[in-house]
Amino acid sequence: MTDYRPDYHPQPPSPPWQAPPVAPWQTPPPPTGSLPARRRGRTLLMVAAVAVVLVAGLGVGLAAGLLTRGSPASTPTGNSGTSTTAAAQALYKQALAATRGSAGVHYVSVSTGASVTQKTVGDATQDGGAQLITLNSTYGDEQFTLRLVSGTVYFQGNTPAVEDQLGVPAGGAAAVQGKWVSVSASDGPYSVLQPGITVAEQASCLAMTPKSIAQVTATDGSKATRINGTFTSQQCGSGPGHLDVAAESHLPIAQASATSAGGITTTGSVTFSGWGIAVPATAPATPVAWSTLGASGPPGGYGGGGGGNSQGPTATPSV
């Protein structure tokens, strides 16, 4: 696999970002806001009345046209509530099994709450994967790449990300920018950086209680079935939403939701492609060990954006 290459360099000079495994990453315009979104695979963070967004990609609150076009997400005519629910439950089980059994998947997740936006572009495999994440926080516009290889997370990011995600003090963060840093399971940031990277953890974000189904047309023109219900992932957020799956393979095409906490609503969307294609991540040649950086938990915790009420990830054995 070729290396990932984000195009954003906030404080030059810095070592070159690595190129992507499939196609060049598309870097979104710098977002605005004061606290960070949460990447897909982390728990929702709320600080006072300010949203900190989870990249969960779910959503009834989003317009259906964001992900698909065609018939609305409603109960099909002629089906009773009981039979429709049973059909939705059966299809959801097939979709979840197909997801878990896939060798790999490419996904793009966008999450927005209040003035906060986060984008995650990733490739998941059965035992690893990689993500390119951009988000805004009190540290600035963060951009960083993660690779999970043989249980170790490798991190490469700009200065704001180094401070927030790794806990490196401001005085030393610039020197770490652009360098690959290895984060082991016993290191402080690991429990925040690692969740959400593998196929199994992407499947955990699909945890839901199905309620009804409807036929829709996917953005590529293919036929799809929409499963309406309530997402229940502790890791990626809960709330009403829908999951669109391919008519024949039952593999997810798109996911959308609106999750609420503290009176603030976060909307998100995820699109899936490249099912069955494993893009393995590779370990960088000369990473720096996180334990040598003199880092410690920043205000709000690792990846907390400088807020004062960060939560770590919660296991989700239900899916």
Image: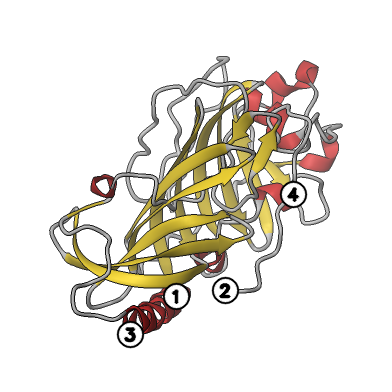
Find out whether the residues at labels 2 and 1 contact each other: C-beta distance under 8 Å. yes
Give the numbered dot on residue 83. Answer: 3
Local packing at callout 1 (Cα closer than 10 Å; few below 14, some 14-19, many 20+) is some
Residue 120 visible in rendering: no
Q: Earlier in the sequence, mark 4 or mark 2?
A: 4
Q: Which residue is mark 1?
A: 96
Q: Amino acid at mark 2?
A: Val
- The answer to which of 284 and 23 lies nearer the viewer is 23
**Mark whose residue sits in front, 4 or 3:** 3
User: Residue 59 location, x and y as percent?
Assistant: 41, 51
On the image, which quarter does residue 138 sit in?
top right
Q: Residue at x 42, y 66 (%)?
A: 104
- The answer to which of 215 and 190 lies nearer the viewer is 215
Q: Which residue is mark 2?
A: 319
On the image, which quarter does residue 304 sit in?
top right
User: Residue 53 location, x and y as percent?
Assistant: 56, 38
